[in-house]
Image (cartoon, rainbow, N blue to C red):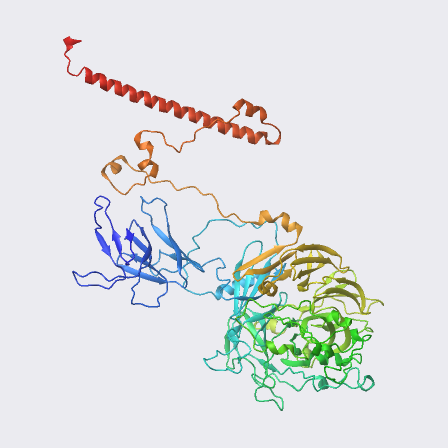
Amino acid sequence: MCSHSDGSLTLWNLKSPSRPFQTTVPHGKSQREGRKSESCKPILKVEYKTCRNSEPFIIFSGGLSYDKACRRPSLTIMHGKAITVLEMDHPIVEFLTLCETPYPNEFQEPYAVAVLLEKDLIVVDLTQTNFPIFENPYPMDIHESPVTCTAYFADCPPDLILVLYSIGVKHKKQGYSNKEWPVSGGAWNLGAQTYPEIIITGHADGTIKFWDASAMTLQMLYKLKTSKVFEKQKAGEGKQTCELVEEDPFAVQMIYWCPESRIFCVSGVSAYVIIYKFSRHEITTEIVSLEVRLQCDVEDIITPEPETSPPFPDLSSQLPPSRSLSGSTNTVSSEGVTKDSIPCLSVKTRPVRMPPGYQADLVIQLVWVDGEPPQQITSLSISSAYGIVAFGNCTGLVVVDFIQKTVLLSMGTIDLYRSSDLYQRQPRSPRKNRQFIADNFCMRGLSNFYPDLTKRIRTSYQSLTELNDSPVPLELERCKSPTSETRENSYNRSRSSSISSIDKDSKEAITALYFMESFARKNDSTVSPCLFVGTSLGMVVLISLNLPSSDEQRFTEPVVVLPSGTFLSLKGAVLTFSCMDRTGSLMQPPYEVWRDPNNTDENEKTWKRKLVMNYSSSSQEMGDHQYTIICSEKQAKVFSLPSQTCLYVHNITETSFILQADVVVMCNSACLACFCANGHIMIMSLPSLRPMLDVNYLPLTDMRIARTFCFTNEGQALYLVSPTEIQRLTYSQEMCDNIQDMLGDLFTPIETPEAQNRGFLKGLFGGSGQTFDREELFGEASAGKASRSLAQHIPGPGSIEGMKGAAGGVMGELTRARIALDERGQRLGELEEKTAGMMTSAEAFSKHAHELMLKYKDKKWYQF
């Protein structure tokens, strides 16, 4: 069978190859007799497979009619009179029919077709009439939508992978073949690693994917679509509200996950935060939404003198003009709100069916302010034990109680300093006559310097160019951005139109948030719930959280959130926080033990919240009880609390800046891992901050690396090396020693199926075709000569005896084996020479016998 460029198929008889005995155009229109068949698109490949109990299968790609425009790439399966066209999502690169036997002279019995597409691999089941596809066990769709952020969790609770997989299986599409994946080559090697690993990827279309990354595998467990909580935008609608992002309004920007409590929080480029809770039961409910007006206008701020400013003013006086906010859906119950105080997206107001898995519990959206869209969120954190979520951007900080669905704090960054008289604000003066007070620089009015220096705001999509329009004193060098070059993000699909507005004078971004049981003030003797707030200027503000004492009151009594007046400072933007106890052991933030919020069991309804605090709140002897580790883009510091004494300082880099930093656990010890923009990966001990590793790994060549690089426990990290590839790396010597045991085997040896036995009569009188090797048909063996492919021994300059004398030491065994092979080859060569000599002698004998016969052919017996 042959395929042609006009979309036709021809069948030939090898006994009369002058012309094909059958010509068909499978997708051509039927023509009248005597007319030529209609031409179709070329058939690029065709396969003809025989069956024992049915008609043969004819499978080919292409061949569709030209009049069907915009048809997708297709694979056609012909079985008898039935013709089935399978349309593909991507162009076909190659296909291969899988059969029961590899020998074409037998009945092949095809059972599947493997189709390689440009961006996928599918296998079609030929044993069922509707030709379903097999469920692909491999993560072929990791780049289904561009990855915008990643999170990596090693040594997480072992039951999470099973739970996520069991929920994810229920959400998978129907219509797959009920048989197992037929491609069985290769084998996984798990090695000695026993702890589970999970990778979470956020995508431009708003999807979240959970992956099982244990050992060297990568298997998708669960898929969550954040866009389902919002209304679909119609064409031409919401033009004003969608200026924040042009193409991907649901793109995921930040992820925060608590594996112990299974609380999941995500923020998107459209200035929204969604809180998800995990449940095994399906529910239908309305989505609760909060709208927050976050505004900070420093042009009109005049702070009074220290003696007239109370150290802890009333909370209501600190709120910007957003006033009181309610939790009603898609409404803002504040007076004097301008007509454009609307969110960028619309949350669904009707009841929504939520399948088992992660279900939306609360949606928080920032609204437009005075015609300006809300700024993108730059930091995010959540505490399941406190029931509080906090997020910030270059405008200010928002703290929300997701248990009572109320806003606790909505405050501009500049207002966070007002709780202390050390942070007084002088009236603004013209740009030319600005005065600086050097001796009070470290503790006074950092935001007064904003007109002189545009700060680089760390977002997932774009960084700003540092501008310096006037001489800056030496004291300001510590606040300078580490680079003056504009770094463009490679991912430009979701670009904010308001990014250009974040270089205003009043912007100090919230870059890091951290919930912890700590000492909010110097005179505290016991720990209390605290929120660490880090800014882009290297300032750290401790916010005190006053929670109700009992579980019953927690659902009704208000939570008081107030800046404590404690401030710490570092060089550069703050990146991460962590805490250790007095023994040097890493302290984990408190969390609530997970329970199903939708469980109908009576025992579960009366079940109280179970909190794991990881710290004793009882009074202890006098002295410092806690170490706080703070890392910025320039340096790391360790403070002793509650005395707030700086114990250790390490300037990590002077010429570059840190992109990602995190406190991780290796071999039951905590250390600080940093990835620098110049490509260095640095590991420091805690709490002493002693450098343990400094490796020049990979210079920053793409903003994709900066956006997706993340560390995790046990000495591992990952990033997206390309839009479609995840690169994992390790800085653990133990894993490096075991890396070969963890690698899988691509090929596994199997026994070749035995060929079918052919009887004498079947071979004599015909039957099915027979397969011959090319050498058998056209080689010299058919002419009675030895094959050229046989090994011949070519003696070298040294004799075999000399080689035997040289063999010895470590390579003796290998040399002796090589000698044995050479001797065997020499014997084979000698045997071949003897065989050729015997054949020559036989030919000469036959020749002489023939000549002798001709010589005495006509002679009579009496003539001899």
Is residue 508 placed above or below 755 in the rendered structure?
A: below
User: Residue at 74% across / 74% down in the picture?
Assistant: 472
x%, y% of residue 657?
A: 68, 64
What is the quadrant of residue 448 in the picture? bottom right
x%, y% of residue 773?
A: 34, 39
Residue 283 makes an appearance in the image:
no
What is the quadrant of residue 74 in the picture? bottom left
Is 256 positioned to the left or the right of 113 in the image? right
Is residue 290 placed above or below 831 in the rendered structure?
A: below
Is 708 positioned to the left or the right of 42 in the image? right
Residue 68 or residue 454, whichever sits in front:
454
Give the residue furthest to the bottom: 336
x%, y% of residue 239?
A: 50, 82
Is 507 positioned to the left or the right of 218 in the image? right
Is residue 238 placed above or below 530 in the rendered structure?
A: below
Is 298 positioned to the left or the right of 359 in the image? right
The mark total stands at: 0
Residue 743 or residue 599, whichever sits in front:
743
x%, y% of residue 681?
A: 67, 58
Residue 568 or residue 551, whichever sits in front:
568
Residue 34 makes an appearance in the image:
yes
Residue 542 or residue 725, whichever sits in front:
725
Looking at the rendering, in which quadrant would you find the C terminus?
A: top left
Give the residue furthest to the right: 622
